[in-house]
Amino acid sequence: CAHPKIPGLVRLSSKSLEASPPFHSRNNCIVPRTLVNTNNMLGFKNLDVDLLLKEEGKRIFYDILSGKIEEDPTLLLRFLVISFVDLKNWKVYYDVAFPSLVLNSKMTFLRLHSASEVLSQEEETSLSKSMKVWRDSNETTGCPFFGVHIYSDSSVVIRQLKCWKGYSGDHQKLLFGFYDHGHQDYPGWALRNYIAFLSLRWKIEKVQFLCYRERRGEPDLEKSLIGEASFAAPHGWDGSDYVPEIIGWEGEKAGDRKKEKILKPIDLDSLNPASQDEEKQVMHLKLMGWRHPSLVLNKLRSARCLVLGAGALGCEVSRLLMTWGVRKLTVVDGGCVAIPDIVKQSLYVDNDCGVPRATAIVPHLKERCPAVEVEGIQMEIPVPGNPVSKTKMSSVLDNCKRLQALVASSDVVFLLTDTWESRWFPTLLCANENKIAITAASGYDSYLVMRHGAGPGHNLSTEDALGHQRLGCCFCNDSTSFVNVYQIKTLVLNETVALPGLTSIASGKAVELFARILHHEEGIHAPGDIAGMDTEHWLGLLPHQMQGSLPECALSTVIGNSSNDCNACSNGVLSEYRREGLDFIMKAINQPTYLKDLTGVSNNVIKLDTCLTLPVSFPVNSGKLSSV
């Protein structure tokens, strides 16, 4: 092939498998092939590749002896393809062989130079003109092997191999030419079979050859090669059953024997309708990438996000995470969809009523984004200060172990449950595992969105791994402390009463905070930014806490360092957890005052209010931290 912008390589197209092969053209030289396709990978691996190659080589060998090559020179270029098409995974595994006959006599290159160095200017001009005529003719362009006759007056005549009887004459030079797809300083693989043909069929022992090459559809005589080779007549090839040595698997050399097939995969996932839909769904992110080259789609796609809570906040956060390109989601919730949820929780429909939220949310996410890998887990998150009976002890421990595994296998954890108590154990696990944790919560007309600071590490330091003062978690501030949810049941319901637009605002800010952390060079260790600060980050400021109020249209950014007496992320609590493991968790669950006694927090600090109430606005001084 000699496409104006594509090197002349062997290519398989959609027409290659048609019963009637296409006609030769200026840009297509049709060559015969054998395709062996298996039904499964085991059959592919068990193919006798040596036997298959030998059979293809025998065809070339017998075609040379019978004279078929003179009528159809493309038979010298016969090739073999073995394949297995894995339709389920949109992959093709293959290997290719170009059978070449190995002469048992030594072949010597006497000289090899660029054609422009060997030919005179007049001969070069004549050869270029003659090759253009040859290549532009549908009758001859499909003949990859030919004879080049150069006469004393520098004129050039090109003849097909079937006209070999006319090769004797008063020409000054006779070159045996062939289309050479290579660009190196040595001949391509087709020369081996060409010389075998000249030796076996025409009994020639010394030839001058032309490796004809083109560039952008024009003869390139600087890259084309003219060489001279000598080779003794092969011996022992006259036997009726004789078959010469055959090589040709990609990467194989004479004398080698393939020990193991190396599978060459072709990924056809771009043809998968689901992949095409996915490409359209992330197009807005790619457009963002043109404006902001720092956007890393693979980082977003591979991030494993754990969403705790599938209520109003959980639905919105899950949907927005998919919009940001996240494709690995795990959603945990212990409740069921109720009739009032249909309006407030954006993903559910009437048919979901009575269905566990963790089950109902999965198909709705898959409907919006088929490429997302989402798992819904129905599970009650253990809460402190809520003693459990011995009969339930085993199931609570199983839930604890499962939550441990989920946090450990995730990159980001979103704390979106209805009560603060249910956020305590995940907060402790994130601090212990040094996982990114993001809290979003809403009151009636105000909201809080914050990222938890990095964990204290193995040394339980007050500084993180980069030497920064650790930022606090959602329990470091006494305004978010908890009490036993079962002691004040009526107030829990008040937490679900919020202005309709509040959920979308808080969810959007939580997901944007996630994207900024993921793209920040310091990640979870990034210090908190304050509104009005200058930043070089292309996504903008990365605050620690955002506290907002809808009635006053107010948004404040707050920085809070970790508290030494925090009941979730302080060194004392983490130290006990690392020492006792789940025994520590069960103490916190079964003994209402255990955490207060451990951290030294007095009773008057614990707020007897499980409903989050935030002030309308927060005075912020960028030079000071909040008192935590």
Image: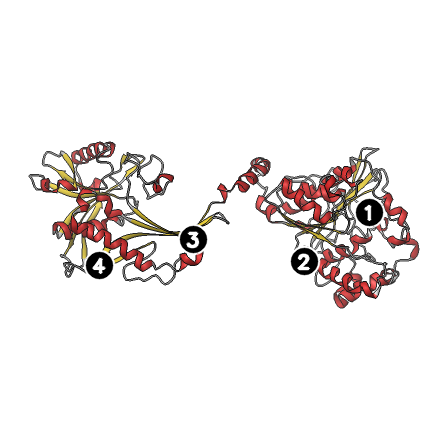
Residue 325 found in image quarter:
top right
Can residue 509 be seen by looking at this rendering? no
Q: Quickly name the residue at label 3.
A: 39
Query: Which callout, 2 or 4, points at the residue further toward the start of the chain?
Result: 4
Q: Amino acid at mark 3?
A: Asn
How many C-alpha atoms fall within 10 Å of the one at disc 3: few (<14), some, or many (≥20)?
Answer: few
Q: Quickly name the residue at label 2.
A: 408
Contact (Cβ within 8 Å) of mark 2 with mark 4: no
User: Between 287 and 277, which is closer to the camera in this rendering?
Assistant: 277
Query: Which callout, 3 or 4, points at the residue further toward the start of the chain?
Result: 3
User: Between 280 and 114, which is closer to the camera in this rendering?
Assistant: 280
Instruction: Name the element at disc 1.
Output: loop
How many C-alpha atoms fall within 10 Å of the one at disc 1: few (<14), some, or many (≥20)?
Answer: few
Query: Which mark lies nearer to you, 2 or 4?
Result: 4
Relative to residue 481, is residue 129 depicted above or below? above
Question: Which quadrant is home to the N terminus?
Answer: top left
Q: Quickly name the residue at label 1.
A: 626
Instruction: Name the element at disc 3.
Output: loop
- Residue 21 horizontal side relative to residue 146, left or right: right
Relative to residue 432, is residue 142 depicted above or below? above
